[in-house]
Image (cartoon, rainbow, N blue to C red):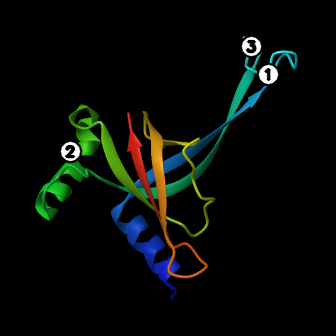
């Protein structure tokens, strides 16, 4: 089993289903490339698993507790880190969003773990 497979298995085991949302804008009026009320936005989604970690927690026990609280109360935090396995998914960018149930997070930063040519893990800093 490769490291990419191991990362994917661990995140599937410990994470929850999320979607990476990509929005595409189609101009309604080509004379107004800055946008117009006739523009249409279409969204596409990649479904994957993500592990949410509150980076403000000080130790492992507090981090694990914060992960479980995220499910109950998104008001407690305004930014979290999401770990996503890289295998089988296109690398997210700051133009994408993370959809977790009925909550949508904006991606603020994308980092990848790449010990060679292949990415194993994407680390996303997301915020409200």
Residue drawn where x is 20% and y is 49% of the image: 56
Distance between the alpha carbons at the discs numbered 1 and 2:
43 Å
Secondary structure under the numbered disc 2 in the rendered image: helix
Q: Earlier in the sequence, mark 3 or mark 2?
A: 3
Residue found farthest to the bottom: 1
Residue drawn where x is 28% and y is 35% of the image: 74
Distance between the alpha carbons at the discs numbered 1 and 3:
8 Å
Distance between the alpha carbons at the discs numbered 3 and 2:
41 Å
User: Left of 45 or right of it: where is 2?
Assistant: left
Q: Position of residue 83 (x, y in %)?
A: 41, 60
Q: Position of residue 22 (x, y in %)?
A: 63, 41
Q: Which residue is mark 2?
A: 69
Q: Image quadrant of residue 50?
A: bottom left
Q: How many marks?
A: 3
Residue 77 vertical placement versus 58 (above, below): above
Residue 119 vertical placement versus 92 (above, below): below
Q: Earlier in the sequence, mark 1 or mark 2?
A: 1
Question: Front-most of 75 and 13?
Answer: 75
User: Left of 92 or right of it: where is 14?
Assistant: left
Q: For the residues labelled 1 and 2, say whether their Cβ atoms are less than 8 Å apart.
A: no
Q: Which residue is mark 3?
A: 36
Residue drawn where x is 52% and y is 57% of the image: 48
Q: Which residue is mark 1?
A: 33
Question: Front-most of 110 and 73?
Answer: 110
Q: Position of residue 37 (x, y in %)?
A: 72, 11
């Amino acid at each position: 089993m490769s490291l990419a497979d191991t990362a994917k298995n661990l995140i599937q085991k410990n994470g929850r289903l999320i979607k990476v949302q990509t929005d595409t804008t189609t101009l309604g009026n080509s004379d107004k490339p800055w946008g117009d009320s006739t523009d249409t936005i279409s969204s596409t989604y990649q479904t994957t698993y993500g592990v949410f970690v509150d980076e403000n927690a000080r130790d492992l026990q507090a981090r694990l507790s914060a992960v479980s609280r995220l499910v109950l109360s998104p008001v407690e935090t305004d930014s979290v880190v999401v770990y996503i396995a890289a295998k089988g998914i296109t690398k997210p960018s700051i133009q994408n969003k993370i959809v977790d149930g009925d909550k949508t997070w904006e991606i603020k930063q994308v980092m990848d773990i790449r010990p060679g040519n292949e990415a194993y893990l994407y680390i996303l800093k997301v915020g409200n």
